[in-house]
Image: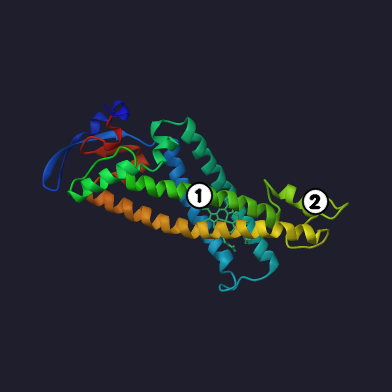
Amino acid sequence: MPKEAINQVAANQGAVSHQGVSQEVKVYKVWDTPTRLFHWINLGLVMVLIFIGMVMLFKGDIGISGLEAKIGLKKLHVWVGYLFAINLSVRLIWGVIGSHSARLSQLLPDLKGLSGYKAKLAKGESPQYLHHNPMGRLAIFAMMLLLVTIMVTGLVRAGTDIYYPPFGGAVSDYIAQPGVDGASIKPYDDTGVDAQKVAVLKPYKSLAGEVHVYSVYLLILMIVLHVAGVIVAEIKHQPGLVSAMISGNKPLSGPAEDEKH
Ligand code: HEM
């Protein structure tokens, strides 16, 4: 018996016709409120961060110039980045202490399940999943890894580039000349800065910046694949996937493959 069957929404039972065959649909509770909130807040913040990031990258082409504007964009990006980092950190903690469907174990790749899933699709069947199907799990695992990488490299870059928390205080103290208070050091200003120590930090700063931007490009690719996969699955195999991430109620027209014991 699926664990979430206890939470089955009895009122929403009915019959649907799929590929000419009438099937009984049962609606289950899935994706608790914190998980759904994380998903939509994360989507919004990632879109805003991609937008600000692209403005930063191509500011010359769109007529934005001057050091003040450059630093202002970075500060804005980092402030929104903090919201993104808080939302992601809460989700990771919730993945350890939250409900069954929020657990991080639900996001780990299921390679055995993947071959079974593909075999069923090849036979023209529409296997039903209470959580992610094995293909979705793969995409979500990759996106989570990329989000964490982007968060860590972004925070490192915020510290080394504009001396923002959580690492900025330590960075500015390190690069300050003897007798200079690290807190007095300004971004993109050499006053009071030890050039040799800046040179020591430079490779790490560059690496963090490159990993940050290439992870963003990979994330954009994964978002496109994820959305395409959801649309195909929603239309061809399991209607109600998208609304389940809004309402927390998921209709299944057969036994849940991921809850079989
Ligand atoms: C999914 C979330 C994020 C996306 C899509 C994103 C996107 C980008 C992009 C496209 C750039 C390149 C701009 C450039 O190099 O001129 C960039 C740079 C930067 N990001 Fe992010 N970012 C994200 C999260 C974060 C976070 C969480 C932080 C820190 C709180 C952060 C801090 C920075 C900083 C400081 C730079 C400037 C690097 C530099 O110009 O040297 N980012 N980001």
On whether ligand 1 comes within 8 Å of the CB at mark 1, the answer is: yes
**Kind of residue sitting beneath label 2:** Gly
Q: Residue 199 sits in which quadrant?
A: bottom right
Q: Residue 70 sits in which quadrant?
A: bottom right
Q: Would you name the residue on which mark 1 appears?
A: 147
Ligand 1 located in image quadrant:
bottom right
Judge whether 118 appears above or below 1 on screen. below
Q: Earlier in the sequence, mark 1 or mark 2?
A: 1
62 or 101, nearer to the observer: 101
Q: Secondary structure at mark 2?
A: helix
**Kind of residue sitting beneath label 1:** Leu
Residue in the picture at 39% in, 31% down: 100
Judge whether 119 appears above or below 52 on screen. above
210 or 236, nearer to the observer: 210
Is the Cβ of the residue at disc 1 closer than 8 Å to that at disc 2? no
Quadrant where the image shows the C terminus: top left
Q: Is residue 214 left or right of residue 7?
A: right
